[in-house]
Amino acid sequence: MYNKFLLIGSGSSIYEIKNVLSSLALEVEIANVYSEIIPRLRKAEIVIFDRDSYLSNPRLMKNILNTLGRSEKDFVILSREKSTSAVFAAKESGAADYILKPYNVREVNLRLSAIL
């Protein structure tokens, strides 16, 4: 079972998920900027990436996805983007799951449990 989570992003979704995971006594870190991702990624066992936090910077979003894909860590993407191309791009980069916003916290728990 995974105990160390890295949450990437700065939206309210990240803090909502942090509260849920923390209430389960799981270790949770947040990375808001790219320079924080690499050192925190080394310690993490699973990553949740809020894609929407980086919509204004598509190049950075792509760099983060590439970094996650190369990391060989399981990662889940949260996004409002429901186009098939966005979902396929996420899956092709190695995402274990793609969760559409708005989501139900219980749904996120169930989908994370499936990965765990």
Image (cartoon, rainbow, N blue to C red):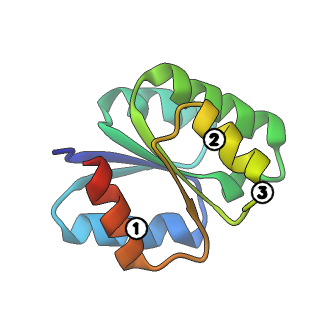
Residue 57: % across, % down: 82, 44
Mark 3 or mark 1: which comes first in sequence? Answer: 3
Which label's residue is closer to the chain start, 1 or 2? 2
Q: Using the image, determine if residue 19 lies above or below residue 86.
A: below
Residue at horizontal 53%, vertical 32%? 94
- Quadrant for the N terminus, please: top left
- Where is residue 6 drawn, in percent x and y? 39, 45
Quadrant of res 22: bottom left
For the residues carrying marks 3 and 1, which lies nearer the camera in this image? Answer: 3
Quote the CA–CA distance across marks 3 and 2.
11 Å
Q: Residues within 10 Å of mark 3 (few under 14, many from 20)?
A: few
Give the residue number, with chain letter if any, for mark 2.
90
Q: Which mark is residue 83?
A: 3
Of residues 4 and 70, which is closer to you in this image? 70
What amino acid type should be assigned to the residue bearing mark 1?
Val
Crowd band around label 2 with a 10 angstrom C-alpha radius: few (<14), some (14–19), many (20+)? many
Q: Earlier in the sequence, mark 3 or mark 2?
A: 3
Taking the image as shown, residue 10 lies to the left or right of residue 25, namely: right
Secondary structure of the residue carrying numbered label 1? helix
Q: Residue 49 appears at what percent x and percent y?
A: 54, 49
Q: Is residue 26 left or right of residue 79?
A: left
Q: CA distance from mark 3 to mark 1?
A: 20 Å
Q: Which residue is mark 1?
A: 108
Q: Is residue 114 left or right of residue 85?
A: left
Q: Secondary structure at mark 3?
A: loop
Residue type, mark 3 in image:
Ser
